[in-house]
Amino acid sequence: EPEVTQTPSHQVTQMGQEVILRCVPISNHLYFYWYRQILGQKVEFLVSFYNNEISEKSEIFDDQFSVERPDGSNFTLKIRSTKLEDSAMYFCASREFSGSTDTQYFGPGTRLTVL
Amino acid sequence: AQRVTQPEKLLSVFKGAPVELKCNYSYSGSPELFWYVQYSRQRLQLLLRHISRESIKGFTADLNKGETSFHLKKPFAQEEDSAMYYCALRETSYDKVIFGPGTSLSVIP
């Protein structure tokens, strides 16, 4: 069964550095998402992406964050200047169709640690 | 604003006992409700959704619009059910999934 993949599984960075988290969605999916989960807290929506543009973003997704689909397979989340509070598990998800009958499939996550 | 609550952070039951994981939501429209499960060191997986009305791994959940609840139930807990369970909501006109805080289920052998 096809799966969403994410790399790296764990990223350690210094505060102020840029990080790029990578995701490969399921190949025929059209909708892409990033969520994050700070340790001990709930999973929070960051951004959704369709047709090469952001369709919705949360208040967490400020100017330090950006997303891109640089080619036909990857979907990336960039944090321009990381802060300590960006330390979290970041989940990518993808979905095939629009409408209420399909579901989002999640990747295994990337654990980001900002020192 | 839409919100999902799961009152129990941690729930322990004995193997073979019934289990109920509570979920309440607040949303004025007609949301789509889900249960996701995350086994140790694994990814979030969809367990079930209210519109399909199916039973997965013996779990069922009924949407009660009057009580705005979507509790997850299983009549006989198994050790392999030990995991983190997240109730989640999606507005039909939007795309994002809003997660509850999660309940960690521990099934004692």
Image (cartoon, coloured by chain):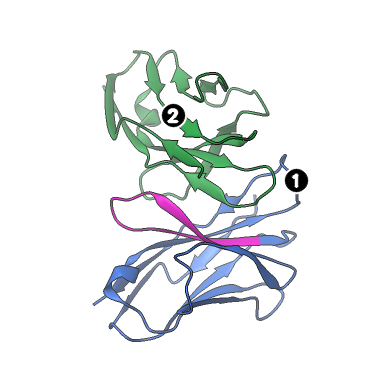
Residue B69, percent from left and from top: 49, 24
Q: Residues within 10 Å of mark 2 (few under 14, many from 20)?
A: many
Vertical arrangement, residue A30 with respect to residue B79, above or below: below
Magenta stretch bounds: A32-46
Q: Disc 1 is attached to a residue of which chain?
A: A
Main SS, magenta region, reads strand
Q: Amino acid at mark 1?
A: Gly
- Gap in angstroms between the C-alphas marked 1 and 2: 24 Å
Return the x and y of residue B87 as percentages of the image width and height. Answer: 47, 36
Name the secondary structure under disc 2. Answer: loop
The chain drawn in green is: B
State whether residue A48 appears in this view: no
Q: Where residue B30 appears, x then y in whole percent?
A: 65, 33
Q: What residue is drawn where x is 75% and y is 45%?
A: A99
Q: Which mark is residue B23?
A: 2
Q: Is residue B17 magenta?
A: no
- Whether residue B87 sits left or right of residue B33 in the image: it is left
Left or right? Give the position of A11 relative to B47. left
Letter of the chain shown blue in the rendering? A
